[in-house]
Image (tube, rainbow, N blue to C red):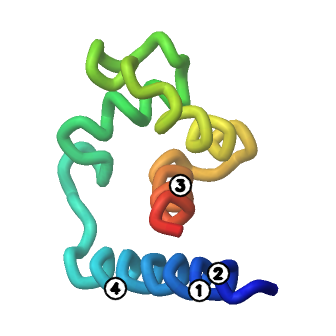
């Protein structure tokens, strides 16, 4: 592994650790059964159809597609978005 790749991997792992620590410290939202204020629309896009949700959430399909794929594999929709959040932090 080159030095640059090792440094990038270390930075990515630190980012995931920071994200994890912040998510623990901030807690979980209780609104709309844990989906939040706009999360309900994103959950509909991921679990029902990409034509669901509202105009703002439909404009961001690349955020939805990985979570939708995980949800289709049987992962709970909230957990699917959480997995994606960790991947995005990486």
**Could you give the CA–CA distance between mark 2 and mark 4, rounded to whole angstroms?**
26 Å
Which numbered dot is residue 18? none
Q: Nearer the viewer, residue 17 or 49?
A: 17
Q: Nearer the viewer, residue 45 or 6?
A: 6
Q: Which residue is mark 3?
A: 84
Which numbered dot is residue 7? 1
Bin the neighbour count of mark 3 within 10 Å (Cα to Cα): few under 14, some 14-19, many 20 and up: some
Looking at the image, is 80 positioned above or below residue 65?
below
Bin the neighbour count of mark 2 within 10 Å (Cα to Cα): few under 14, some 14-19, many 20 and up: few
Q: Quadrant of residue 69?
A: top right
**Could you give the CA–CA distance between mark 3 and mark 4, rounded to whole angstroms?**
16 Å
Question: Which residue occupies 53% across, 55% down?
Answer: 84
Bin the neighbour count of mark 4 within 10 Å (Cα to Cα): few under 14, some 14-19, many 20 and up: few
Q: Which residue is mark 4?
A: 21
**Could you give the CA–CA distance between mark 2 and mark 1, rounded to whole angstroms?**
5 Å
Q: Which residue is mark 2?
A: 4
């Amino acid at each position: 592994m080159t030095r640059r790749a090792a440094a990038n991997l270390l930075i990515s792992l630190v980012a995931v650790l920071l994200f994890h620590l912040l998510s623990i410290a901030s807690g979980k939202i209780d609104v709309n059964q844990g989906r939040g204020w706009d999360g309900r629309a994103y959950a509909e896009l991921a679990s029902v159809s990409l034509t669901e949700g509202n105009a703002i959430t439909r404009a961001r399909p690349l955020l939805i597609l990985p979570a939708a794929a995980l949800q289709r594999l049987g992962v709970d929709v909230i957990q699917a978005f959480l997995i994606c959040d960790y991947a995005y932090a990486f």
